[in-house]
Amino acid sequence: MKAVYFAWVRERIGKTEEVLAPPPEVVSVADLIGWLRGRGEGYEAAFEQAGAIRAALDRSHVRHEAPIAGAREIAFFPPMTGG
C-alpha cells in the first residue's frame, strides 16, 4: 500500500510518500497510525494527536475504524478549514 502525507504530517515525517507493508495484525486506519508511530521520532511527532489526523483510502475520506484491506493508497492529512 502506498502512503501519502500532506501538510505538517509530511513535514514531520520528512517524506511525501512511501510504500508500506504493515504486519497482518494492522487491519484498520487506527491500527496503521499506531504502527506508524512506532517507526521513529518523525512519525511519533506526526501522529501524536492521532484523533486530529484525517485519512483517505483510495481517495475517499474514512474514519479511523475503517478497514485497510485491499486499499492501494492511504493519505494522511491534518484537519482542513475553509473560508
Image (tube, rainbow, N blue to C red):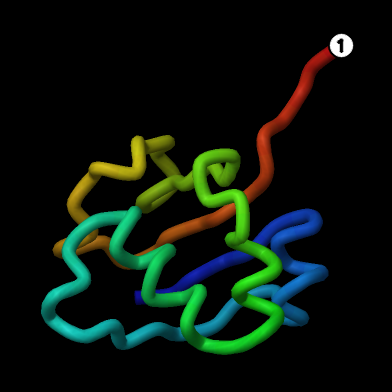
Q: Which residue is mark 1?
A: 83
Judge left or right: residue 45 versus residue 22.
Answer: right
Q: The residue tagged with tag 1: helix, strand or loop? A: loop
Q: In the depicted view, which residue is nearer to us: 16 or 30?
A: 30
Residue at position x 46%, y 76% from top? 36
70 versus 22 height, above or below: above
Judge left or right: residue 1 versus residue 54.
Answer: left
At which x and y percent is residue 39?
51, 87
At which x and y percent is residue 12?
77, 71
49 versus 32 height, above or below: above
Residue at position x 61%, y 73% from top? 44
Rendering quarter of residue 5: bottom right
Q: In the depicted view, which residue is nearer to us: 64 or 83?
A: 64
Q: In the depicted view, which residue is nearer to us: 43 or 54?
A: 43
Rendering quarter of residue 82: top right
Quadrant location of the N terminus? bottom left
Residue most extreme to the top: 83
Amino acid beneath label 1? Gly
Quadrant location of the C terminus? top right
80 versus 32 height, above or below: above
Residue most extreme to the right: 83
Residue at position x 59%, y 61% from top? 47
At which x and y percent is residue 41?
68, 84
At which x and y percent is residue 52?
59, 39
